[in-house]
Image: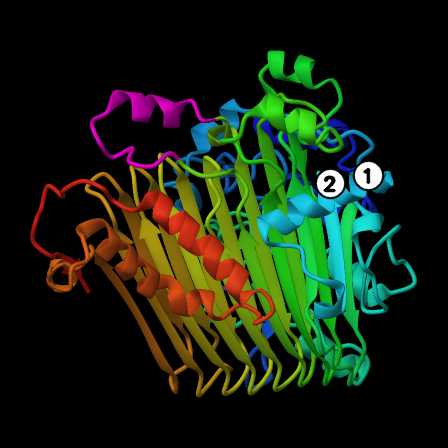
Amino acid sequence: NACYAALLGDAIDNCVGDGMFEDTSSAQLVSQELFREINEPDVYTKLPPKKPTKEGAMEYEFTRNYQRRLPDTPWLPPFGIENYGIVMPRRGAEAWKQFDLTGLVQQEYEHLPESYGIDLELSEKDVKVYRDELVKRGVFENEDEVSAQLVYVNGRFAPQLSIVSEEAYNLKEAPTDRPDLMKAFAQLPDGFTDAMPSEVGEMSEQQEEKQGQSIAHMSWPHHNVGPAASQFAINNQQGMACFAALNTLRTKSVTLIDVPAHKVVEKPIVIINAVSRGGGAKDVQEIKQRGEGVSFHPRLLVNAMPYSKVSIIQSSVDLFNEEVDENEVAQENPAFYEDETFLPKFYNGYTQLLIRTNATVQHSYVDETGGMVTPNVESLDKDIRTKEANRAALKNTHFEVIDAHLTGGDAVYKSTVIEMGGNGRNRIGYTANILQPNQEVFLDAMVLTGGVQKSDIRTTLHHSGYKSVSKQQLKFMVGGRSTLSFRGRIRIEDEAQQTDADQLSRTLLLTDKARLWAIPSLEIAADDVKCTHGCSVSDLSDEELFYFKSRGINNIDGRKLQMYGFVRDVARSVDPVTFEKVKDRVFDRLNNIVYLGKRAIEQDFASI
């Protein structure tokens, strides 16, 4: 709570932030309903609310998830909501058991970049320096290859580096003339916004009310999860709602992609979030002496109207490589090397997508912040391990919440998530709410970890539409002394009959010191579905390595070839415009974490 309060800053006093959407409902962190329940005099005796059954009769909502305290018992709030009415991270909580919460809490990120929320003005010389660096990083595209390209540096929009269009632009202020967008900006994941978004326009009020159904009461009365603040619901959440709310409070950098109905955007839209060593903070030396850091809260909202089509490439990248000589870089590139001092950074991103009837969205998310991990830390060489332990980016934390809502029938969402940054703590929370019939969601994800990183990825595919389809392919490569935690959840409501849902996670443990926790799960309330989930954990095949040796390829190069083949199909799922560049950058990261020594266990091992 103290860590979260520091991130809130002055916003904690009145639960109102200084960001763009301070008046939206998600900015009210304290759950008024929850605390009103505490103070009601008849809380011991009143009956639960009534809900209509499928037959139309009204019945009291007595279910196993309905929580009421007995007379004369103390009121104990569900685990983690004591201060704000929204779930706070706890080391013993299901969502955070394997995450490095201790490191997150011990590092303060209370500062914001200087002039946060004001566009970044650059000279002609500075523009060239920035552009050359982004091209070097492989994320900057030529004008003729994109329909729009928006660049943010340390959370500030850089108009001189950007190309805006009618469909994609940076928001200067909250779009109060668009109630549908304002409602979307107030949306929180994990059921803390209880009503699902509804289709805009072509519905009556009764239809919209029916479509915006309550998450807590889906599959009622026997299989509903109950209120988001109940312990039963909390046990199945990703735990990222509090950081989504923090983003809503603090964000001043908002990208809006608003694609009109029947519009096909032929070329991809590129979003670049670039971060420098000092994070753009003021008084960097003083902040460093106090051991504090800086935080960013980028926001992206995609609104794909009916029968539209768009491809989006979203990248997070460093402006500097830790391995270069700092003095040399400072002399050659004074424009954006604003300070040679490194500050710990907390990147708290929130991406929302609203995909309407017959709309198709292809979305690629790639994170490369934090530089490269130190190779070969699994060895007994103390110098190598000390170098990795002292690597500055280990103090960084990178969060990204991706929350997609398919609100219209026959909508399609194709997504690719690639996490290969070198930050000390990485966490991705991915949710797709499949609300209407005949919708399709495809997820290809890849996570590369090395050094002593602590990474976490959570996926939730929530089916409530008839005859919908979801396919997940997740590939993880865990090297060095790093750890990775994965939990994949598929929930199918009783109305989502004839659903076809697949989830497959495959992991390569590259060293004897790497660790993985993988928990795939299914929650099925319907009785006519086709669902599968699978999880495999293995090492690189000695038989294949022997084959490479017989062809004159040594162990190291053979391992590289195996690793390339393992992740190539995920890299191919990104937009073709950037595929070759992404592939090269993925291969560079793989070369950095390839295992150089001999394993303690020489035989192949695998668990299916």
Q: Does the magenta stretch include residue 386?
A: yes
Question: What is the x, y in percent for residue 146?
Answer: 72, 67
Position in image of residue 418 (x %, y %): 48, 57
Residue drawn at point x = 41 percent, y = 48 percent: 589
The amino acid type found where label 2 is placed reads: Val
Q: Residue at x 54, y 60 (%)?
A: 581
The 10 Å Cα crowd at callout 1, few under 14, some 14 to 19, many 20 or more, is few
Against 371, residue 256 (above or below) is: below
Farthest residue, direction right: 177
Q: Nearer the viewer, residue 220 or 432?
A: 432
The image quadrant where one finds the N terminus is top right
Residue name at image x 54 percent, y 35 percent: 321
Q: Above or below — where is 382 with respect to 236?
A: above
| Residue 524, percent from left and from top | 39, 74
Q: In which quarter of the image is the C terminus?
A: bottom left
Residue 294: give x, y in percent of width and height.
65, 29
Q: In this view, does 248 lie to the left or right of 466?
A: right
Give the residue type that dot 1 points to. Lys
Q: What stretch is highlighted in magenta?
A: 374-391
Could you tell me how far apart the alpha carbons at marks 1 and 2 are, in whole angstroms? 6 Å
Q: Nearer the viewer, residue 9 or 309?
A: 309
Q: Is residue 560 magenta?
A: no
Q: Name the residue under label 2.
A: 129
Q: Is residue 194 visible?
A: no
Left or right, residue 163 beside residue 239? right
Q: In which quarter of the image is residue 455?
A: top left
Q: Residue at x 68, y 13 (%)?
A: 286
Q: Which mark is residue 125?
A: 1
Q: Is any atom of residue 73 visible in this view? A: yes
Disc 1 secondary structure class: helix
Circles 1 and 2 in contact, beta carbons < 8 Å:
yes
